Image (spheres, rainbow, N blue to C red):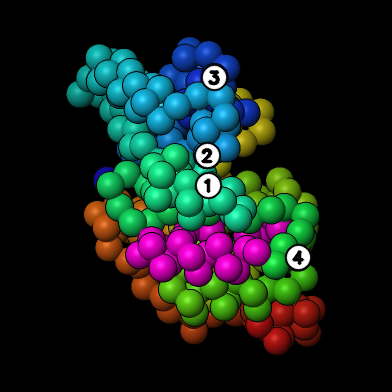
Amino acid sequence: MGWVDIHTHLLPGIDDGPREMAAALDIARRAAVDGTDIMVATPHQRDVMLGSSIQHVRDLVSEINGRLRAEEEPHRPVVRVVMGMENHIEPGLPDWVEDGRALPIGNTRFILSEPPFSSYPDYVDDVLRRLQDLRLVPIIAHPERNAVLQRDAKKVRRMVEDGMFVQITAGSLLGDFGRLAQRLAEQLVRDGGAHFVASDTHRPVDARTPELTPAFNRVVELTNEARALELFDENPRMLLAGREPDHDLSRAFERGAFDSDRRWWRFW
């Protein structure tokens, strides 16, 4: 089996992903060649709410799957696209969920929830609790890219302890979003604080492409192949099946993970 990518901006003309269907199909083809067999389409919830519709998103997912299936051959596998949404964590989110304007991943109760990048407003924790009150399970999207969480990683640990899950962006492990994002991403991978690695792809080439192989290899270097398979394959498949991955926060895979040149992690 191939990898499962739970965070992608694959659908054309919805948000800051591809503008045209041709580019969307190119993303899906490149992902398949790289070893991915399921992609969750997660357009930005606010863009859908303000400029599109849930039905249009469903129609695009259906169209892409139809076009890809038409290309499938024994020697040429194609990805399957599942519907989801990247939901900005803001005060109205629980109400939008109840109204059907904000969606979980597929037919599950797991909801991809994106914190702000440069701040951590007081309402974030309240919104996440309200989502849990609705019997949803937040998947925190790329917390390693949040400036506040980079300085206070214990907040991420508390989210996991409270029953939430963490999705790391593949590019963060490769340094694409700066050294602070990379350090936090690596530590979450080592210590069991990360549960998924996803591409957050926006385009077929250049930045944020759909290929996951470089990040998979980096996780193997940091930990081992079994841990990499958890993050790229086993855990996301469990999610799509409606099952929760392991919440083990006690694992430390890298030799010397807490040595003197990483003292700032000592109080994680």
Q: Nearer the viewer, mark 2 or mark 4?
A: 2
Q: Is residue 223 visible?
A: no
97 lies left or right of 93 = left
Disc 3 and disc 1 in contact, CB within 8 angstroms:
no
Q: Does 23 lie within the magenta span? A: no
Give the Cα separation between the discs numbered 2 and 3. 14 Å
Q: Nearer the viewer, mark 2 or mark 3?
A: 2
| Three-letter amino acid code of the residue under disc 2 | Gln
Q: Which residue is mark 3?
A: 13
Q: Residue at x 39, y 42 (%)?
A: 100
Disc ID at residue 175:
none
Q: Is residue 266 visible?
A: yes
Q: Which residue is mark 1?
A: 87
Front residue (pair 253, 129): 129
Q: Earlier in the sequence, mark 1 or mark 2?
A: 2
Disc 4 and disc 3 in contact, CB within 8 angstroms:
no
Position of residue 192 relative to residue 109, above or below, is below
Q: Residue at x 43, y 49 (%)?
A: 97
236 lies left or right of 147 = left
Magenta region, residue range: 123-146
